[in-house]
Image (cartoon, grey):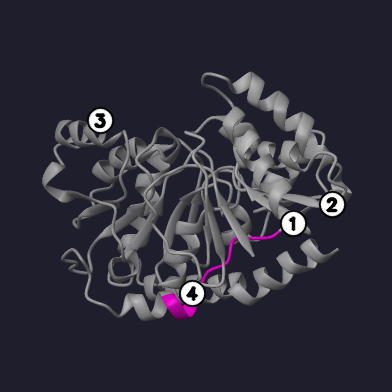
Amino acid sequence: LHLALLDRETAAYRPPAHVTVHQLDTRNRLGPSIVQLRRLVRRLRPAATLSFLTRANVANAAAMLGSGRPWLISERVNTSAHLAQGRGAVAARAMVRLAYPRASHVIAVSEGVVEDLTRNFGVPRRRVSSIANPVDHERITALASERPEIAVTGDEVVAAGRLVPAKNFAMLLTAFAASGVPGRLVLMGEGPERAALEAQAQRLGIADRVLMPGFVANPFAVLSRARLFAMSSNAEGFPNGLVEAMACGLPVVATNCASGPSEILADAPREAIAGTHSVEAGALVPPCDADAFAAALREIYDSPGRAAMGRAALARSLDYGVERATSEYWRRVEA
């Protein structure tokens, strides 16, 4: 197994020892990604390639062009939402439409992403499948037993993710302030929205009850001691943080965004759910609806059935084990 990393960035995780790592230096640009990856492919002559994320997927398509060997791509985001705006969005969508339908197989992280790729980007349905991201329950259990990096009292509402607009932590702050729940809100993660979120917390009068510790190396020690988990995203590919919080036995309040939360929490497509929807593990609420999110936070925070919700969350998370995802990936690669 060979792993090609496109950019020189600080490593958050160490690959297994049996994986040969090739560190490229494309500086977050598509052109150099194509050139350097194609050069590597010519040297290694891999039996098959599998790429992750949009730029890597397009580069993979260009690098394997004319090789006669299979190349697969994995789409980690809801592509339409991810490429909806910003500089270069139109060109990026065009490149996806050109590259993705030609892949040997496309692996999406949720059925919502499958639907988006087939409907909006011309990927033939027979060549795309959904494989959810795996959750390593043994590792989470071990890490959850460690001492947390920050003090946790058991009354916290916890959220996690990059501090970026797509996560909509601004709405979460508004909802938390309106909910009246007495505990703290802990936002684990770092990103460009930090200053704006800190200023908003000050305006809302909740700055003393909002903790933003930045990147937390072991979030599970915090999650396992909290009261509930909040996911306020406008869009997801597959919300890893949601399932990992559920694996810690936390009830959840999550937006019914594209894609993934409805599949995880209600085993139903997003379009089948209207308004706030109670589930065994907590609640699904409409995206960008601070009032609905506040009401759901308040209800679950004080619910006498909160412990049962946490048990249901843990039980559901077991459907996303490592063994299942591994076998599904190998089945697609070897097809």
Q: Earlier in the sequence, mark 2 or mark 3?
A: 2
The local crowd at label 1, few if under 14, some if 14 to 19, many if 20 or more residues have their Cα within 10 Å, is some
Residue 310 is one of the magenta-drawn residues = no
| Number of the front mark, 4 or 1 | 1
The quarter of the image holding the N terminus is bottom right
Closer mark to the observer between disc 1 and disc 3: 1
Counting from the top left corner in percent of width and height, residue 7 is at 48, 42
Name the residue furthest front.
43
Mark-to-mark CA distance, 4 and 3: 34 Å
Q: Earlier in the sequence, mark 1 or mark 3?
A: 1
Secondary-structure class at tag 1: loop
The residue range painted magenta reads 131-139
Q: Residue at x 50, y 63 (%)?
A: 243
**Comparing labels 4 and 2, the label whose residue is closer to the camera:** 2
SS state under label 4: helix
User: Distance from label 2 to label 1 (Cα)?
Assistant: 8 Å
Q: CA distance from mark 4 to mark 2?
A: 41 Å
- Whether residue 272 is visible to the viewer of this picture, yes or no, is no
Where, by quadrant of the figure, is residue 292 drawn? top left
Task: Report which residue position mark 4 lands on.
Answer: 314
Proximity of marks 2 and 3: CB atoms separated by less than 8 Å: no
Tag 2 and tag 1, C-beta contact below 8 Å:
yes
| Disc 4 to disc 3: CB gap under 8 Å | no
